[in-house]
Image: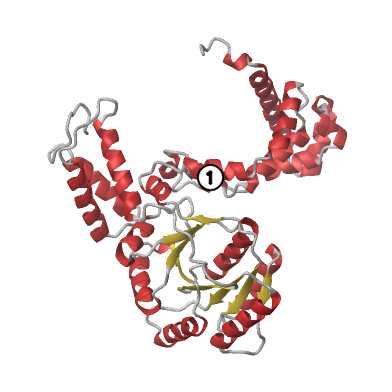
């Protein structure tokens, strides 16, 4: 729309701003926040000369992107964990927002990335399965759990947990509380009492990002009662573009500290405003995608793999290991949505996260010798593998062909053949 324009004016950005407002509303940003945002962008964009090196549309995108990131806090915010240990983190939020799962994810993050010794504390005495859920999570991540059977006073449990943590050398106490409705006066009074009794270093408000604009009013009410320090957005998967983040930050003026997506316990990260700005604008999130790949990247293994490829020794065992690394990166649909332009295309797509299962079954049905020497796979061997893996001969043949094609391509890349004819 701005093609060929040398200056951004009120006339030539009218349609552009209309599209921006629509994109924000589609991303679940509240109407009032979207309108105020567009007014701010308009004021900053009007009259700006467009540099020769960029197109007017690119200049406008940069203005919108920078303003979005600024509105969501601009920079990354970390939890306030100052003062003597144990540090205390109070988790609050609505029923079903994902507080208990997030508590486990946070404990694992503190353990693995900060080198801390966390103590999970179960203070949800109302939901029958809450304590058991936290017990299962704590066992799966190797973190200690504090509970008190028969005690129905969350304030007492929280205070005793802190005493226990001091005596056992735990660095941080993460207190999972019961979900409550903002209109439930009794429950809201209870969590106020917990906060007053334990005086946490940080109070986090957990909100399901899929609730959209409803999350904004809920956050406002909780903030009035608890004066929480930061927000946690859960269920920020491939279908959720993060508009709730923009609305909450604009209304309650509290930083969003963490984002959580998927069921895996590692699926939690600090909130990066610039990356969420990319998602809201449908620009993907390549930075996060690269970081996820780097987390699974092993330099020594990569060197070994490079040597095997150069000597044409890439085997089905290596192929299988590559599949496992891809799976560790997380939900396939979520990973694909981080690629620019893919988020919208995949919004209603049904991508099966178990797409690798048949390939894994086929490889596992091979003998060790067949995995290392794929040329041994004649017709009778392939038939046996199909029966052993619960697949059919067509699927086995397809996988072998994919493997051979991958092997050939990697050999060509390693030898430089694929770059012939390209001027450096």
Snapshot colouring = secondary structure
* Residue at the extreme left: 11
**Residue 101 seen in the current view:** yes
Picture quarter containing residue 412? top right
Residue 58 at x, y percent in the picture? 29, 34
Relative to 346, is 383 on the left or the right? right
Q: Quadrant of the N terminus?
A: top left
Relative to 392, is 219 on the left or the right? left
Residue 256 at x, y percent in the picture? 42, 60
Q: Nearer the viewer, residue 367 or 294?
A: 294
User: Circle 1 is placed at which residue position?
Assistant: 335
Quick check: 312 above or below 175?
above
Quick check: 145 above or below 307?
below
> Which residue is at 47% across, 81% downward?
195
**Residue 356 seen in the current view:** no
Residue 16 at x, y percent in the picture? 22, 41
* Residue at the extreme front: 83
* Residue at the extreme top: 421
Is disc 1 surrounded by few (<14), some (14 to 19) or many (20+) residues within 10 Å?
Answer: many
> Which residue is at 51% across, 11% downward?
423
Picture quarter containing residue 32? bottom left
Quick check: 280 above or below 368?
below
Q: Secondary structure at mark 1?
A: helix
> Which residue is at 65% across, 59% downward?
115
Picture quarter containing residue 71? bottom left
Residue 119 at x, y percent in the picture? 64, 72
């Amino acid at each position: 729309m701005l093609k060929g324009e040398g200056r951004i004016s009120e006339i030539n950005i009218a349609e552009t701003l209309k599209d921006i407002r629509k994109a924000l509303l589609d991303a679940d940003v509240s109407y009032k926040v979207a309108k105020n945002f567009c007014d701010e962008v308009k004021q900053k964009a009007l009259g700006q000369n467009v540099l020769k090196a960029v197109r007017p549309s690119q200049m406008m995108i940069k203005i919108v992107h920078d303003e979005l990131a600024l509105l969501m806090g601009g920079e990354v915010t970390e939890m306030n964990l100052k003062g003597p240990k144990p540090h205390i983190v109070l988790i609050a939020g609505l029923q079903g927002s994902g507080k208990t799962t997030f508590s486990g994810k946070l404990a694992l993050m503190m353990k693995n990335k900060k080198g801390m010794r966390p103590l999970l504390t179960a203070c949800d005495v109302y939901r029958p399965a809450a304590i058991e859920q936290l017990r299962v999570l704590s066992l799966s991540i190797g973190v200690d759990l504090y509970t008190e059977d028969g005690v129905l006073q969350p304030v007492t449990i929280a205070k005793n947990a802190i005493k226990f943590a001091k005596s056992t050398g735990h660095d941080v106490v993460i207190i999972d509380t019961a979900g409550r409705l903002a209109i439930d006066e009794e429950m809201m009074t209870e969590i106020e009492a917990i906060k007053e009794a334990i005086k946490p270093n940080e109070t986090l408000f957990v909100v399901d990002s899929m609730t959209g604009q409803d999350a904004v009013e809920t956050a406002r009410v909780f903030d009035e009662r608890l004066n929480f320090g930061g927000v946690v957005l859960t269920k920020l998967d491939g279908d959720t573009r993060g508009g709730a983040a923009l609305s909450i930050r604009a209304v309650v003026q509290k930083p969003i500290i963490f984002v959580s997506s998927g069921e895996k316990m590692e699926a939690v990260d600090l909130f990066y405003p610039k990356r969420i700005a990319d998602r809201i604008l449908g620009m993907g999130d390549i930075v996060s995608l690269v970081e996820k790949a780097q987390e699974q990247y092993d330099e020594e293994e990569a060197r070994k793999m490079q040597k095997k490829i150069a000597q044409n020794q890439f085997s089905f065992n290596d192929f299988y290991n590559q599949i496992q690394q891809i799976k560790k990166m997380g939900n396939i649909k979520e990973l694909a949505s981080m690629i620019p332009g893919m988020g919208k295309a995949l919004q209603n797509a049904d991508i099966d996260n178990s797409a690798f299962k048949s390939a894994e079954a086929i490889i596992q049905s091979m003998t060790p010798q067949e995995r290392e020497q794929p040329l041994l796979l004649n017709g009778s061997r392939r038939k046996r593998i199909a029966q052993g893996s619960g697949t059919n001969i067509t699927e086995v043949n397809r996988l072998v062909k994919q493997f051979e094609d991958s092997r050939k391509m990697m050999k060509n890349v390693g030898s430089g053949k694929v770059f012939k004819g390209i001027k450096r």
